[in-house]
Image (cartoon, rainbow, N blue to C red):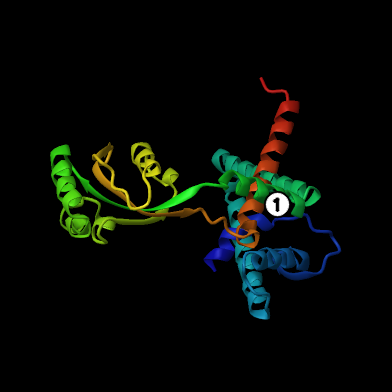
Amino acid sequence: MKRIVMLAAACAVAVPAFAQNVATVNGKAISQQSLDQFVKLLVSQGATDSPQLREQVKQEMINRQIFVQAAEKDGIAKQADVQTEISLAREGILVRALMADYLKKHPITDKQIQDEYNKAKQQQAGQQEYKVRHILVEDEKTANDLLAQIKKDKSKFADLAKKNSKDPGSGANGGDLGWAAPTNYVKPFADTVGSLKKGQLADKPVQTQFGWHIIEVEDTRPVEFPPLDQVRPQLEEMLRQQALGEYQKQLRDKATIK
């Protein structure tokens, strides 16, 4: 029910005088058209159209009309702060409707999605991702002492990470950070990862804002770009936002702003 109350404000529409009514409250009609639109909105948000939902919506619209009439009777609707909220709500509804109308008239095409996918795939071509493990400590001396032990015997890396690393996530896993592109890390760390080859240990500790790191690249592989079907929703949404941003800029450029 709370969900219905929150969505109710979005359903105010102009209703023809001849529309069939589902109820009246103190002579004020609640039209079938209003109820249908309310149900349609809820269905678009994931609800299932059913007699039970329609009855629930009807009762909520009756309750809402009772409250509205009480607010109008008490003069609340004329209060300045209430008028401001009503105005802002109206503006928000109009903006959303305008954007929806623009996207309906200018839908994102399959070609646009494919072109964006190809561009992103090309940008990532040839890039590598790295399987990295590290040990994070607070000071350089501790880092150098641990690094010296690892250089003598690499098999100690995991145990030393578990005992000494200040990174609780990777430390418990022997320092393992899993697979990632260097860009996932802060710059000093990323630069070192990108400079190392498979099986190579950084010859000195690396300092970041988190502390001192002992870094080893366990393995490398080409970045696997996901198939189009997997990223289509994200690409389509990104293109929608870009289109709306361009539309907003066009409108703003035409507006007289002082």
Tell whether 171 sits left or right of 107: left
Task: State the SS at label 1.
Answer: helix
The residue under label 1 is 113
The answer to which quarter of the image holds residue 205 is top left
Of residues 205 and 113, which is closer to you in this image?
Answer: 205
User: Could you tell me if residue 109 is visible in this image?
Assistant: no
Report the residue at 62% width, 51% height from top.
72
Task: Provide residue 170's location: percent of width, then percent of height.
Answer: 28, 56
Tell whether 94 sits left or right of 132: right
Task: Provide residue 249's location: percent of width, then percent of height.
Answer: 69, 32
The quadrant the C terminus occupies is: top right
- In the displayed image of the protein, which residue is found farthest to the bottom? 51
Of residues 81 and 95, which is closer to you in this image?
Answer: 95
Label 1 Cα neighbours within 10 Å, binned few <14 / some 14-19 / many ≥20: many
Task: Provide residue 59's location: percent of width, then percent of height.
Answer: 62, 71
Of residues 204 and 164, which is closer to you in this image?
Answer: 204
